[in-house]
Image (cartoon, rainbow, N blue to C red):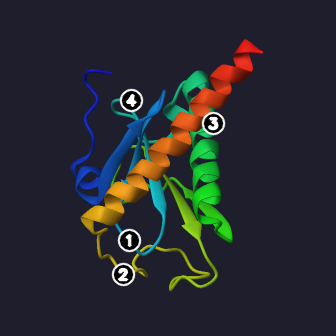
Amino acid sequence: MPDFTLHKQLEADSILVLDLPLSQLRLQNQKAIPWLILVPRRTEIKEIFELSAADRAALMEEIVQASQALTELYAPDKINVAALGNMVPQLHVHVIARFTQDTAWPNPVWGKLDTAPYELGALVEVKRRLQDFFSQKADRQIAGTRS
């Protein structure tokens, strides 16, 4: 998608982890809680229903994969998935690991968490762990198709 442009707020608040088949997988740069954002690389799309059927299916699979990554890497009590877009109209989906001990529990996280960003070393490590998870998942899928 050569004409895809990431909304400036998403770019400012998150870090690119990797490109999935449909979406950019981004890490919310807020160390208080593991928080991923999927941004489908589709221009002018604001709502999930505006995606093609194939893109909706791909987005759902990417939500599942992001949820699995957070579950495997952090063992949260709950995964929250949300596509709000009230402040940023570009379609994006939040996948958030929640813990009964987090400061926002059981309420939504918006405006309730410390907004301090990751320190560089921690950011590099989190990004590497996420990339490793998705790389290993892809390797397992390739191996499964060869069986």
The C terminus, quarter of image: top right
Whether tag 1 and tag 3 are in contact, CB under 8 A, the answer is no
Q: Quadrant of residue 136?
A: top right
**Which residue is disc 1 drawn over?**
31
Q: For residue 61, which numbered disc appears in the image?
A: 3
Residue type at numbered disc 3: Glu
Q: Is residue 140 above or below residue 18?
A: above
Query: Residue 49 appears at what percent x and percent y?
Result: 56, 36
Q: Is residue 22 above or below residue 129?
A: above
Q: Residues within 10 Å of mark 3 (few under 14, many from 20)?
A: few
In this view of the protein, can residue 109 be seen by the observer? yes
Type of amino acid at the residue the image marks with label 4: Arg
Specify few, some or many for label 1: CA neighbours under 10 Å numbering under 14, 14-19, or 20 or more: some
Q: Earlier in the sequence, mark 4 or mark 1?
A: 1
Q: CA distance from mark 2 to mark 4?
A: 31 Å
The answer to whether residue 29 of the structure is visible from this angle is: no
- Which sits earlier in the primary sequence, circle 1 or circle 2? 1
Residue corresponding to mark 2: 114
Viewer-side label of 2, 4: 2
Give the residue type at disc 2: Asp
Mark 4 and mark 1: span between their CA atoms?
28 Å
The mark found on residue 42 in the picture is: 4
For the residue pair 133 and 22, the one nearer the viewer reads as: 133
Q: Residue at x 39, y 29 (%)?
A: 42
